[in-house]
Amino acid sequence: MDSTKEGASKAACGCNGCAPEENGRFLNATPMLNELESGPWPSFVSGFKEMAERTKKPMLRGVLDQLEYSYKTRMGYWKGGLVTVEGYGAGIITRYSMIKDKFPEAAEFHTMRIQPPPGLHYNTAMLRELCDIWEKYGSGIITLHGQTGDIMLQGIEQDKVQECFDELNQKGWDLGGAGAGMRTGVSCIGPGRCENACYDNLKLHFKALKHFSGQVHRPEWNYKIKFKFSGCPNDCTNAIMRSDLAVIGTWKDAIQIDRDEVRAWIDERGIDTLVNQVISNCPTGAISLKDGEMEIESRDCVRCMHCLNVMPKALSKGEERGISLLMGGKNTLKVGVNMGSLIVPYMKMETDEDIEEFLELIEEIIDWWDDNGLDHERIGETIERVGLKQFIEGVGLEADINMVSRPRDNPYFKAKY
Ligand code: SF4
Ligand code: SF4
């Protein structure tokens, strides 16, 4: 139904006395929000309206009305607070209306952060259960996935939160992180579906988040800290730019070359294409042509993945695989945007013992940050403030030339390409 028509109720203007159903309508007029539905892009306004009409949930109508009012007055009217479930101190983002007298239907619109499985591998039965429970207790609106990596269940009232969580938890779902603790981890699809994966990032993600589960649910540090696990240097999770602890799959030996596939690639596209699209684009000049054969100088390769991405059948990752750990990546905060700095150039990640060793190192790093960091200071900011030397001495790491020659940088460098 078009809520812009003449005769629609006036509730979106701030009037509290209308009853749109009496006019055979469910939604109030929202002329300013409707503007967002024009243009080529999908609009959240259309989604909200469609859902509100279908479910007839007054909360959704109230949220649209309050948003229209916000646009009119150029003010936001949500405020925070504290909502939690038994045994937890985080995971629910509160949203209380400051003008609930005007829009009582939208008095509360809290968000439940739910942890997704590693690599976002769902099955339809899980998703149906999640949707059914959420429609029963909440607004029905779901964001897959928020910037935090969580499934965002948006719009629930405080008195329904515990019951909703209990039912979700019975089906195997758990709340994600919020506040000054370990946040929800993110991993790429990894070896489940990608040939580039250099380690089982899904397993490591699962083990790491289980290990730090207490700190996910009960924040106890200076500020937030977050893992992202990318299976290879393509870094599809954006770990280096958007996580404090970026775990990137890599290899130590040479890129594997399938000579027959290289010849087939050249036969199909021509030698000029090889030169222009592969050899010339290697950032370190590690690739050359010798007697018509493509050669890669491993010592010069910085694992940028370009040649492997262009020639996926002919070139593949090396055989001696593991991880690199980069630390300190984050988006804008007090001191601007940072890419992670390389802290551990190579670490094996094959056995349960390797995982244990990795978790011990992370514990050591977090302890150091907890002792040395200031309130609301991300770990990269702490390292920047006290110095890399003090950090590596503090956590017992060996100094490595890569820490100096691959320092942090501005992520927008990558975003340009
Ligand atoms: Fe595949 Fe690498 Fe992307 Fe993971 S980061 S999905 S392993 S290309
Ligand atoms: Fe060059 Fe990147 Fe290929 Fe290494 S992975 S050889 S740096 S293009």
Image: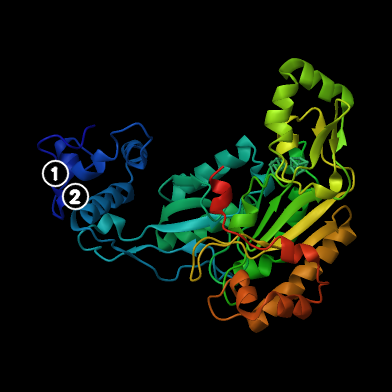
**Three-letter code, disc 1:** Ser
Counting the numbered discs, the total is 2
Q: Which mark is residue 9?
A: 1
State the residue at coordinates (81%, 35%): 288
Q: Residue beneath label 2, please?
A: 12
Q: Nearer the viewer, mark 2 or mark 1?
A: 2
Left or right, 309 with reference to 182: right
Q: Is residue 96 above or below residue 136?
A: below
**Three-letter code, disc 2:** Ala
Between 85 and 155, which is closer to the camera in this rendering? 155
State the residue at coordinates (73%, 41%): 305
Q: Is residue 283 above or below residue 77?
A: above
Estimate the x, y position of residue 138 in percent, counting from the top left.
43, 51
Estimate the x, y position of residue 182 in percent, counting from the top left.
63, 66
Q: Is residue 228 above or below residue 382?
A: above
User: Considering the numbered disc 1 on the image, is that residue within a helix, a strand or a loop?
Assistant: loop
State the residue at coordinates (65%, 70%): 215
Quadrant assignment for the N terminus: top left
Q: Which mark is residue 227?
A: none
Instruction: Mark 2: give few (<14), some (14-19) or many (20+) Cα within 10 Å.
Output: many
Between 305 and 109, which is closer to the camera in this rendering? 305
State the residue at coordinates (18%, 43%): 20
Instruction: Mark 1: give few (<14), some (14-19) or many (20+) Cα within 10 Å.
Output: many
Residue extending farthest to the bottom is 371
The reply to whether the C-beta atoms of the residues labelled 2 and 1 are less than 8 Å apart is: yes
Q: How much space separates mark 2 and mark 1, taking CA atoms?
A: 8 Å
Left or right, 29 with reference to 222: left
Residue extending farthest to the left is 7
Estimate the x, y position of residue 401 in percent, counting from the top left.
79, 65
Estimate the x, y position of residue 200 in percent, counting from the top left.
79, 48
